[in-house]
Image (cartoon, rainbow, N blue to C red):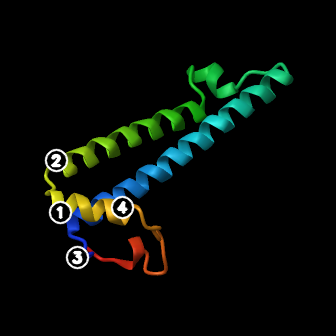
């Protein structure tokens, strides 16, 4: 089986890596929100932005990140529908190997589409 990636395969791998980063970001934002709310409660304070706008800055970031993840998931599903079995096998093989998402070349594993 060839390990040369097509443009579509490369896009899928990069999109998957971006989604993984976005999910990690979302986890971090949720943890930060929990900690911020805990700190505010301990000092009997309210977030001034939430008081004024009804939504905190971190809530906006969380919502934006969730939307981005949903969009990435939709795009990946659309792209996968058009792949052949051989293409899927190559992607599965590549997904099992470690990825250098932002290596020295600035591309996934140094591959160019």
Report the residue marked by disc 4: 14
Q: Nearer the viewer, residue 27 or 68?
A: 27
| Distance Cα–Cα, label 1 vs label 2 | 13 Å
Q: In screen coordinates, is 110 left or right of 4?
A: right
- Mark nearer the N terminus (1 vs 4): 4
**Residue 19 in the image: above or below residue 9:** above
Q: Which of labels 2 and 4 is toward the front? A: 2
- Mark nearer the N terminus (1 vs 2): 2
**Residue 25 in the image: above or below residue 84:** above
| Distance Cα–Cα, label 4 vs label 3 | 19 Å
Helix, strand or loop status at disc 3: loop
Quarter of the rendering containing residue 89: bottom left
**Residue at (23, 58) in percent of width and height:** 88
x%, y% of residue 61?
53, 38
**Residue at (66, 37) in percent of width and height:** 31
Helix, strand or loop status at disc 1: helix
Quarter of the rendering containing residue 52: top right
Q: Nearer the viewer, residue 103 or 35?
A: 103
| Number of marks drawn | 4
| Distance Cα–Cα, label 3 vs label 1 | 9 Å
**Residue 68 in the image: above or below residue 103:** above
How crowded is the residue under tag 2: few (<14 C-alpha within 10 Å), some, or many (20+)? few
Q: Is mark 1 in CB contact (under 8 Å) with mark 4? A: no
Report the residue marked by disc 1: 86
Q: Which of labels 4 and 3 is toward the front? A: 3
Report the residue marked by disc 2: 81
């Amino acid at each position: 089986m060839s390990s040369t990636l097509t443009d579509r395969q490369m896009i899928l791998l990069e999109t998957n890596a971006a989604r993984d980063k976005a999910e990690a970001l979302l986890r971090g934002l949720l943890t930060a929100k929990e900690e911020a709310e805990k700190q505010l409660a301990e000092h009997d304070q309210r977030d001034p932005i939430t008081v004024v706008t009804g939504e905190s800055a971190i809530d906006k970031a969380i919502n934006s990140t969730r939307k981005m993840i949903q969009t990435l998931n939709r795009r990946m599903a659309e792209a996968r529908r058009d792949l052949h079995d051989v293409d899927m096998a190559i992607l599965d093989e590549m997904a099992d190997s470690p990825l250098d998402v932002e290596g020295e070349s600035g591309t996934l594993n140094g591959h160019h589409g």
